[in-house]
Amino acid sequence: MIENIKAFLGDFFVTGDPMIYGADVSIALASIAIVVTLTYFKKWRWLWDEWLTTVDHKKIGIMYIIAALLMLFRGGVDAILMRTQLALPNMNFLDADHYNQIFTTHGTIMIIFVAMPFIFGLMNIAVPLQIGARDVAYPYLNALSFWLFFFGAMLFNLSFVIGGSPDAGWTAYAPYAGPELNPSSVGQNYYYIGVQISGIGSLMTGINFLVTIAKMRAPGMTLFKMPMFTWSILITSLIIIFAFPTFTVTLALGLFDHLLGTHFFTIGGGGSPMLWANLFWFWGHPEVYIVLLPVFGIFSEVIATFAHKTLFGYATMVCSMVAISILSFLTWLHHFFTMGNTAPVNAFFSLSTMLIAIPTGVKIFNWLFTLNKGRIEFTTPMLWALAFIPNFTIGGVTGVMLAMAPADYQYHNSMFLIAHFHSTLIAGTVFGVFCGLHYWWPKMFGYLLNEKLGKWSFWVFMISFNVCFMPMYFLGLMGMTRRMYTYPAGLGWGPVNFIITIGAFGMGVGFVIMAWNIVWSAIKGKRDTTGDPWGGRTLEWSIPSPAPEYNFAHIPKVTTRDAFAAMKEDKKRGREQKPKPFEPIHMPNNSGIPFIMSALFFVAGFGFVFKWYWMGIPGLIGVAICMIARSFVYDDHHHIPTDEIERTERATGRLS
Amino acid sequence: MIKEYKNTAVKPEPKGFPWKQVVGLFLSLALTFLALWVALGLSLPVPITLTVIVGLAIIQALIQLFMFMHFTEGTDPSHQMMGIAFGLFVAFAMVAGTLWIMAFML
Ligand code: HEM
Ligand SMILES: [Cu+2]
């Protein structure tokens, strides 16, 4: 009996590695610390009422960003562990298995649990404010999206200490990920289920924002008067809606192979492992644009604001995004040119990939022309935006190199590829979300991040990024492949790898400075009393910082692009409109169901990971009960009375 | 083109029993199990099985469109057409692309 229990626990918890024991201890300590602090300060009620049940897009946005920053920390630690292992030849810091698990969790976490939620956070904050709306179209669904993402991420992260992490790469290629070569299934199931749960949330976010932007714009704001960030989110939502269902189905089929013994991706029974790669990338390539287009939007806003000019080539910007949204569904094969496809197939996808570089290049020129003759102000967000242009262009150019199918036979799966996609993902997505974070921070919290610390973190991070990833291109050309846990001395790779590792640690330092900046500014940061700290051009800057619960006391009337810049111009000319009396504002009620339902998804997911149907099925029944319960909630909104609006507006100095 | 609207939340549907949705749900379930039975329960030749279940899938897609997805409602039919057109494009790209890519293995 005791032996049985021991054997079970030995399998259940990951054992035998001091690093994992360290993680166990730190997870336990952190949980205890959180519980104790909340109890001591009697904050449970506050946590539940203000955050866990909220449907306010601004609070949901903040929670997305906090979660994304925590996950960035976890993914960054993974990166540093890998780089430490590779710093010198023949290192024994991580063994092969452990290295495989770490690059898998690093990749999955960075894409699914950092890049996506960070972008979702920023769009939750900014889009409703930019279009003059009081919330998103479906606030309840928005909360559900967030909690599904959150519990999906938690489930995936749990694999590290319970059961063991997946090790088949973030791409989870069959047959290695399949049941034949992965008979215990636990790690792989974590991948399928954790990513699936958060993916459902992403799909709903796409729908929510498409409807929000289509239906909830302020009067007068026609499509071609929308801010560029809003445009980018509109297009992104469209890509999400059409790309994510493929992923949902693909993950489900992969899971069926493990749980139900089907043969979609196994060789036995007529399945095809290559079909996994094909379906995965049919989602995977659009996904790349899902995490890039929004940051293109952020850069457009920031560059226009700090160059003090309207954006150059608004219509071409929009057209190139529409072109990207169509072309992004036609390039997926460039991730597996070497799979044995026929020459015409490779030629087609080679061309379509090069074609998609054209609209992207057009956008680069638009930003350059916006800067041209502008009065440029070098704030922290602007520095991230300016650094993006050259650094991202290197990623783009190497992408075109990779797009040439015959040449790709050389580059494929080498460190050259790793350098390429980090140039786009870091210099694009990460620079972009950091840029947006600094830019919208005052609107979120009512104070600015410190500029000096911000610039330090920028320079340290940006220079280290180049120290890390520039040499990596050459390392790839020297023959080092990806996912290699160690290498012998004497190949000439040692010194290059060492430099790369220095860069990786430098990026860690840059991130720590940014974290310190957040803490420092929370205590001593400059208050933003005007609501318009940057001289902004779009509507989010027309309201106080932080934005009141109802966002706009009066829904603004829009007549032109850069609506707020125009309003300020009017004010200067003395053509201000007389304030109208307030009207009660209709707001959605908070709800605990999204949290509970997502937690039940977590329980169900955990059960299915271990094939414990006694746990998985009741979990799913609980999910269904939550849905039924919600459909009987009729009283789902309230009105904010006019005197409360008046009090709030007076407190922010908007009424005299 | 999409026109601008008052930015209030989407209006709730008129109350009353949602017959349309319930019928749609049961039809979808029936079609799904029918497809399962055709594939597992009958031993028809493979091409016929495939044709039948693809046919059932198309019927089910139409049920979803009309019973759940408010296909016939809305203020501007051009939205629906754009959505459907993009959906058909993506479906075509995936199916035709996959067949073409994997043809070398057949
Ligand atoms: C702190 C900066 C980062 C460093 C030093 C870093 C380093 C690495 C390393 C060493 C690998 C594994 C290479 C190999 O042996 O195959 C890797 C893989 C990967 N990284 Fe990063 N990375 C960083 C940030 C990011 C970010 C921000 C993203 C995405 C938003 C990202 C996405 C990925 C992906 C998708 C993989 C592939 C994983 C796989 O092979 O399955 N990384 N990275
Ligand atoms: Cu791609």
Image: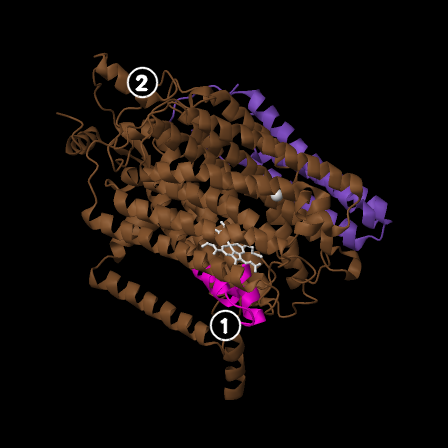
Give the image location of residue A408, x and y in percent. 69, 47
Classed neighbour count for the residue bearing mark 2: other residues with Cα under 10 Å, few (<14), some (14–19), many (≥20): some
Mark 1 or mark 2, which has the lower sequence index?
1
Give the image location of residue A360, x and y in percent. 55, 32
On screen, A265 above or below A614? above
Query: How far is disc 1 from disc 2 in space, using C-alphas?
Result: 59 Å
> Badge 1 sits on which subunit?
A
Question: Which disc is residue B44 wearing?
Answer: none
Q: Which residues are magenta?
A: A77-104
Given the image, on which type of amino acid does mark 1 rest?
Phe
Q: Nearer the viewer, mark 1 or mark 2?
A: 1
On screen, B77 above or below A159? above
Residue A30 in the magenta stretch? The answer is no
For disc 1, the marked residue is A93
> Badge 2 sits on which subunit?
A
Give the image location of residue A221, x and y in percent. 40, 20
Residue A93 in the magenta stretch? The answer is yes
Side of A253 where A106 appears, left or right? left
Chain A: give its colour: brown
Furthest-left residue in this view: A656
Give whichever of A358, B20 is nearer the camera. A358
State whether discs 1 and 2 lie on one chain. yes
For disc 2, the marked residue is A566
Furthest-right residue in this view: B45
Any part of residue A618 in sight: no
